[in-house]
Image: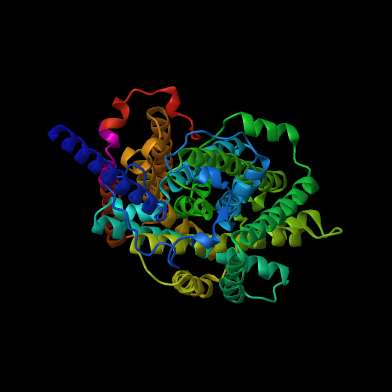
């Protein structure tokens, strides 16, 4: 009897435990867990599906069927490739790729072509490949965790480090936004035949981005469609210029395949890499991928999403590579070896092209202006988008999206207006401004890349989707190379610009603080002591696995 009683109690206990487990399981279905296999980062569940979320559940694009969503235990089965699913996943890569085509990039392209000719095309190709690797890691972080980089940095670092990271990210974003807005203003001045001054173009550009962001209220796909139009406009405009100027095909092919760089073109080489890899874009992509409805507890869905995002991002950056190649080759063909090569910039580039090729059926000046306008308009929208994610992620501001967009837009437009008025005196002053803005972005790049690699390498953050040792080594090698190139650009710039003991002392203190913070982030990541002690394996290299 006693044995039967004990068995009865055991059955009741097991039944009660099973019931509790099912209740917990049912409850889990209603709570979107943020991090797989998380131990060190806390999960904040309050406010889920509120307006301060990156994308509300009702705004996300539904892709997976009910059967696959119902497998909460995390099936690892990945269905066969589907063109329909690829189409549904296409979009975030387009928005991300705009940063590779902003006005700052176009100015770097035209100067590289005018000064270095075709010789740096190989570097454009390889820097785009490096940029693709970094962006795929950013997308991987967002898909596997359900959170974006700024949010995870808030949980990963102490308060003082988090605030420093936020301040530097905002500073770099403002610098990029000034370039983008002024680029659009220059395009409007060109297309209005000088009627609209730079400051008026700044005001128009600053506020018309709200119109395009308003389209998001009608669905994410509408906004992505707008970006497809912008990129298509750039592609058409610069392709027209490319075929109109008839570049040398043999020299173009040699420029792509044969690595060449000289002391005279070293600065342009560094600028090409700097233009392609931008800090705010690393934060942006990890948030954009969350516009698709993915159950991060389902490993099959996560893996499938990573596969499609890898394809669509690669296609998007291939398009940007072709467009950037068009711009470099046009200006290499027209201005390489000429007296105007060292003086050319965004403001006078169209006029110089007009003098070389005349009006024609459709004047090349206006073709250049249309392409520049498309680049400026699209990049200002993504800049505003990135500003929202960065501010909300680091500071956790529980405010409505429209108010957050207004705040982040104002943070950029006020200094942009001041800059437009002060620097609208000559073409040379705008070129000087652009150099200083590039410096601000160069200062920030390590503080976007190091946290990204730190997080994607952590199993407690990524779970089974952490990157393997071999890919980790490759990624850190790319990051170190990029930081060294940016460091060279900063050193070269300050050696030529620093005049006076006081200014020199301030630069020295700033450089010491910059290096010290990089060292702190590297020590926190554990990369220095552990990465080269791990044995690489072939499984760790694939971004899709």
Q: Residue 356 location, x and y as percent?
A: 77, 54
For the question of whether residue 265 can be seen, the reply is no
**Does residue 209 appear left or right of residue 174 in this picture?**
right
Residue at 57% in and 76% down: 203
For the question of whether residue 162 can be seen, the reply is yes
Above or below residue 338? Residue 1 is above
Asked if residue 526 is among those painted magenta in the image, a careful observer would answer yes
* Closer-to-camera residue (403/83): 83
Residue at 50% in and 48% down: 294
Q: Residue 485 location, x and y as percent?
A: 43, 42
Asked if residue 488 is among those painted magenta in the image, a careful observer would answer no
Residue at 42% in and 57% down: 440
Quarter where residue 46 is shown: bottom left
Q: Residue furthest right?
A: 361
Q: Residue 118 location, x and y as percent?
A: 65, 38
Q: Residue furthest left?
A: 2
Quarter where residue 163 is shown: bottom left
User: Which span is picked out in magenta?
Assistant: 519-529
Above or below residue 455? Residue 444 is below
Quarter where residue 11 is shown: top left
What's the magenta bit mostly, secondary-structure-wise?
A: helix
Locate the N terminus by quadrant: top left
Q: Residue 92 location, x and y as percent?
A: 56, 51
Above or below residue 241? Residue 391 is below
């Amino acid at each position: 009897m006693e044995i039967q009683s004990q068995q009865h109690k055991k059955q009741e206990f097991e039944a009660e435990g099973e019931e509790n487990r099912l209740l917990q399981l049912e409850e889990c279905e209603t709570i979107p867990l943020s991090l797989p296999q998380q131990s060190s980062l806390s999960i904040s569940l309050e406010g889920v599906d509120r307006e301060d979320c990156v994308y509300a559940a009702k705004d996300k694009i539904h892709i997976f069927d009910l059967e696959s969503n119902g497998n909460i235990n995390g099936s690892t089965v990945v269905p066969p490739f589907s063109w329909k699913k690829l189409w549904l996943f296409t979009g975030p890569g387009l928005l991300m790729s705009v940063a590779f085509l902003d006005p700052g990039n176009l100015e770097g392209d035209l100067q590289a072509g005018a000064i270095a000719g075709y010789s740096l095309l190989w570097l454009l190709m390889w820097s785009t490949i490096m940029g693709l690797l970094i962006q795929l890691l950013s997308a991987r972080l967002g898909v596997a965790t359900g959170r974006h980089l700024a949010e995870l940095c808030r949980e990963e670092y102490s308060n003082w480090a988090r605030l420093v990271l936020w301040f530097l990210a905002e500073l770099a974003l403002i610098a990029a936004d000034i370039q983008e807005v002024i680029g659009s203003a220059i395009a409007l001045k060109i297309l209005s035949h000088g009627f609209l001054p730079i400051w008026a173009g700044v005001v128009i550009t600053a506020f018309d981005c709200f119109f395009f962001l308003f389209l998001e209220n009608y669905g994410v796909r509408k906004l992505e469609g707008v970006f497809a139009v912008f990129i298509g406009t750039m592609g058409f405009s610069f392709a027209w210029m490319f075929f109109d100027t008839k570049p040398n095909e043999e020299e173009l092919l040699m420029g792509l395949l044969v690595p060449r760089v000289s002391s005279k073109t070293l600065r342009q080489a560094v600028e090409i890499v700097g233009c392609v890899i931008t800090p705010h874009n690393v934060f942006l992509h990890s948030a954009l991928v969350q516009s698709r409805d993915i159950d991060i507890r389902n490993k099959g869905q996560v893996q499938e999403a990573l596969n499609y995002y890898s394809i669509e991002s690669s296609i998007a950056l291939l398009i940007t590579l072709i467009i950037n190649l068009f711009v470099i080759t046009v200006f290499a063909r027209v201005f390489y070896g000429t007296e105007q090569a060292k003086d050319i910039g965004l403001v006078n580039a169209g006029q110089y092209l007009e003098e070389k090729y005349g009006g024609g059926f459709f004047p090349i000046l206006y073709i250049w202006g249309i392409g520049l306008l498309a680049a400026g308009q699209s990049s200002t929208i993504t800049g505003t988008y990135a500003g929202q994610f960065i501010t909300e992620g680091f500071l956790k501001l529980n405010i409505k999206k429209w108010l957050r967009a207004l705040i982040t837009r104002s943070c950029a437009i006020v200094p942009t207006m001041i800059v437009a008025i002060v620097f609208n005196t000559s073409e040379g002053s705008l070129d000087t401004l652009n150099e200083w803005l590039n410096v601000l972005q160069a200062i920030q790049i390590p503080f976007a890349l190091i946290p990204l690699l730190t997080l994607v390498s952590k199993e407690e953050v990524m779970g089974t989707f952490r990157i393997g040792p071999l890919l980790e080594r490759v990624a850190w090698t790319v990051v170190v190379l990029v930081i060294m190139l940016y460091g060279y650009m900063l050193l070269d710039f300050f050696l030529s610009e620093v005049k006076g003991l006081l200014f020199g002392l301030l630069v020295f203190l700033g450089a010491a603080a910059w290096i010290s913070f990089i060292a702190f982030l590297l020590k926190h990541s554990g990369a220095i002591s552990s990465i080269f002690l791990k044995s690489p394996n072939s499984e760790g290299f694939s971004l899709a696995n």
